[in-house]
Amino acid sequence: MHIGIIGAGVAAVALLDALAAEATAPGAITVFDGSQAMWRGRPYQHDVAAVRVNAPPALMSVRAGDRGHYAQWVAERGDTTGYFDEGLGQPIVPRAVYGDYLEQTARRAIDALRGRGWRVSVVNARVTAADGTVLRTEDGGAHPVDRAVLCVGSGRPRDHYGLTGAPGYVGEPYPLARTLSGIAATAHVAVIGSGLTAVDIAAGLAANGHTGPISLLSRSGVLPYVQQRPAPLAPVHLTPVNALRLAERGEIAFTELADLMRAELAGLGQDFGTLAAEIGSTESEEPAARLRRQLADVDATHMGRRLLTMAIRTIGPIVWPRLAEADRKVLRDRHFRTISSLSSPMVPYNANIVLRLLDSGQLRLRRGVTEVEARGGGFVIDTDRAESGCTADVVLNAVNPPAYTTPQETEPLIGALLAGAAAEFGPDGGLLAEAGTRRLLVDGRPHPTWHVLGNLAADAMFIAANPPGLAAEAALLTRQLAG
């Protein structure tokens, strides 16, 4: 068996780690990636220390079934005392350190596989086409494989306002060590987006001693939720087993999931209304007041938000493909920012930086942005609100591409797969894939060669997959490859 892994980010690391743990006859593995950040992906390159991981260690493991794998690695590293997050009571290290974890995990998996007789090679070039089972790379190489797995992630931010090429526009913010270094300390920096990447940029500017104004531009103006201090969770109703039971019955109504949450909270003697009020106020509460309140609630005893964040990640992927289409549309179209900010909250360390910048007036959230235009050597920002627009000297794009979006670098390969009847897009985007095997589907039939891992699959949720979720998916795929 010769397995081709296309992409060398978090999904690929999880797959290599799972393959190394599977007792199967040795074969060959070739990993293809044309980036300079092998094993790290976009966010985990070598970068400024101010850019921290946005989750506690238990939520960042790439080893399936071992939530403590990354935490143990952090503990063994021994140089993380300076990165202790008081709000979480745990170390939250720079993203580059997590990149070290990914790189070391990949290399250990490769060493383990080679020790068992596997032939493992890495090709630093992108796969641009496929002729049957032969993968063709941009450097003219031809690589025959038996199975191929797309682990390509979601790519770089899209240029929604056509600013590419304009002086002062930064389309790819990472690594911030490079993109922020040339910005004048007094410049007005506008950041398109208000999610985790925008928070990273604000923290990076603050660490660089930036004194000029910073504007976060978005339609909603919603900041990520603040991560609460981890607490033991032993759900009785919101469990993967119950989610699987619902999925096996057929179409799932969103009200059934809400009933599971109600039952879970009732069992703890807590009310559902508190959680509902928190979620309902996401886009209406004044951002600084909401941020201040959530920082004060990092130790809150109400388990609603913790349970909901856990459920989005653990049972969400199970029920999403079976959820009624009307419910999926409402969640995708009307509640994207709420679900995204809940599932990917910022750590208290970064939240305190953002609040400090907001309170000082240096940072401002500008909602209802309708246009960003390069004009006169700078940028003009228009909004649909009564407040006037503004101008900026520098614009950084922090809008992550939506789910199911093909990364720009992978478009030639996906185009070749579609043309060769090896892949098919779903009605809402993304490649159709068979549950469990992750084989690409064409006319309802699984393809014998191609698999997909992560958000490029049409049945994936519309939020970015987290490392444990990718690890669980990789473990299931490994069993298929081994079988």
Image (cartoon, rainbow, N blue to C red):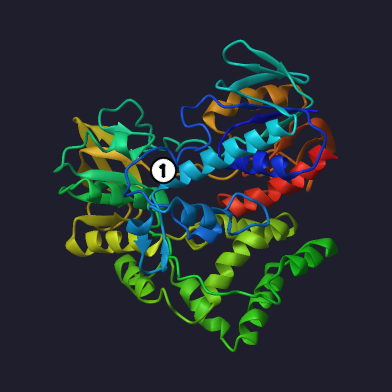
On screen, 215 above or below 433? Answer: below
Identify which residue is drawn at 35% across, 76% down.
296
Identify which residue is drawn at 81% across, 67% down.
245
On screen, 109 above or below 418? Answer: below
Identify which residue is drawn at 65% across, 74% down.
258
Dot 1 amino acid type: Ala
Residues 35 and 191: in front is 35
Query: Badge 1 local density, few (<14 within 10 Å), some, or many (20+)?
Result: many
Residues 420 and 96: in front is 96
Find numbered disc 1 in the image and state the secondary structure of the residue it sits on: helix
Residues 406 and 1: in front is 1
Whether residue 150 is visible, yes or no, is: yes
Residue 272 percent coordinates (x, y)? 57, 82
On screen, 466 above or below 168? Answer: below
Answer left or right for 188 relative to 467: left
- Quarter location, residue 67: bottom right
Residue 482 percent coordinates (x, y)? 81, 39
Residue that label 1 marks: 96
The number of discs equals 1
Q: Quadrant of the N terminus?
A: top right
Whether residue 437 is visible, yes or no, is: no
Residue 133 percent coordinates (x, y)? 77, 21
Residue 114 percent coordinates (x, y)? 69, 30
